[in-house]
Image (cartoon, rainbow, N blue to C red):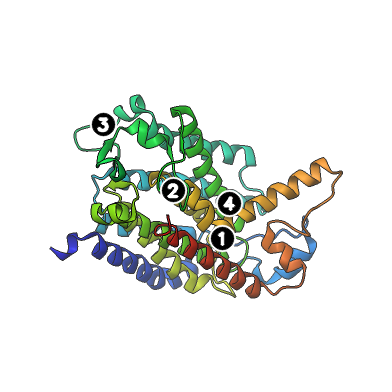
Amino acid sequence: MVLTYTSTRMMLAALTSLFLCIFLGPRFIKKLYELKIGQSIRKEECPLLGELHSKKQNTPTMGGILILFSMLVSLVLWMDLTSPFTLILLGVTMALGSVGAADDILKIRKKNTKGISAKKKMAAQLGISALIALYLFYPPFTELFHVGSWYAPPVAKDLLSGEMTLPLGEYSSRIYIPFFKEPILFLGPLLAILLAILVITGSSNAVNLTDGLDGLAAGCLIMVAICLALIAFVSNNIDLAGYLNILYIEGSGEIAIYLSAFAGACLGFLWYNSHPAQVFMGDTGSLALGGIIGVSAVLLKREFLLAIVGGIFVVEALSVILQVGSYRLRNKKRVFLCAPLHHHFEYKGWHETKVVVRFWIIGLMLTIIGIASLKFQ
């Protein structure tokens, strides 16, 4: 039946989340206005930024609820609810979405831009990432959740070695670099778990930092999601995986379906989030969406590819790290006029839409490079 094909379900998941976002958007935004869930601007910390973004004050936030709701509807309609990939992606969406929502609600109640303290937020993200990493890469922990066909760990095959089925420990230990067929490193269980935690937590925070201009994060996320969805799709097809000399991961088509719903929801949200934005995704959206692409990269063993296709997020996060490090270690000297990096260019006189479109162009170039790495290896 055509509805059982992964490619069909990918398209239907994308269309479902896209139309849900567009259809529910006006009612959702109106409700946010009624509840007075508005965005606060960093006026005290960055006076010039406050001046540039003064019109954004009190624009509804927590639009991530609309994105995540649309994705979860697609998950229920089009994904295999017994697949371990479905349950992992559902779990990370709900968990990180809840952390982001708590942060947004606290900001609104306190009428400031602080929200949950950085330490508490980081602790929550690390805890969620650690649970996912332990489930994937620590067999004794995995077995606690193994009941019949439910919660079974992923099955992978190395087609370059005669379709050898990989034990979970070996699957987790492999590190693949774009443009190379063979894994370049084999990590021990502890290092594999730490890498997964770093990728998931780092991705979640990097998207959160990038979400500062109208449409910037949503547009970049669409491109990353499409790239990872394509990789998940071919990884689930033994013939295509063999042709491309990549790891065959049984059932990874479910990841492709969810990432298609992800891209559709972000595209629908962009309808209202493009300049001038009618709604912001807030931490509710950015923390969860960043965590989802991080988890997807870990599941597909494409951690380093994520660093390329998500290069915008990486650079944005590095700009904040450099700015904070320089301020603390170089007697309050700054590297950038303002961090994250997109605000630096605003300070240099670039209009907001010019910054966003140029970042989108760079993101598209990086996505093409990431997709090309499947063939040129």
Residue 234 falls left or right of residue 44: left
CA–CA distance between discs 1 and 4?
24 Å
Q: Position of residue 350 (x, y in %)?
A: 72, 73
Pointers 1 and 4 in contact (CB under 8 A)? no
- Front: mark 4 or 2: 2
Query: What residue is disc 1 on?
Result: 37
Pointers 3 and 2 in contact (CB under 8 A)? no
Residue 240 is drawn in which quadrant? Answer: bottom left
Of marks 4 and 3, which one's residue comes earlier in the chain?
3
Query: What residue is disc 4 on?
Result: 206
Q: Tell me the number on the disc at residue 302.
A: 2
Mark 3 secondary-structure assignment: loop
Q: For label 4, count other residues whose C-alpha is less than 10 Å away and answer few (under 14), some (14-19) or many (20+).
A: many
Of marks 1 and 4, which one's residue comes earlier in the chain?
1
Mark 1 secondary-structure assignment: loop
Amino acid residing under circle 1: Ile
Of marks 3 and 2, which one's residue comes earlier in the chain?
3
Q: For label 1, count other residues whose C-alpha is less than 10 Å away and answer few (under 14), some (14-19) or many (20+).
A: many
Is 117 in front, or is 256? 256
Residue 262 is drawn in which quadrant? Answer: bottom left
Residue in view at x 50 percent, y 72 percent: 272
Amino acid residing under circle 3: His
Work out whether 92 lies above or below 372: above
- Front: mark 3 or 2: 2
Amino acid residing under circle 2: Arg
Quadrant into which the C terminus falls: bottom left
Residue 56 is drawn in which quadrant? Answer: bottom right
Mark 4 secondary-structure assignment: helix
Q: Residue furthest right?
A: 331
CA–CA distance between discs 3 and 2?
25 Å
Query: What residue is disc 3 on?
Result: 146
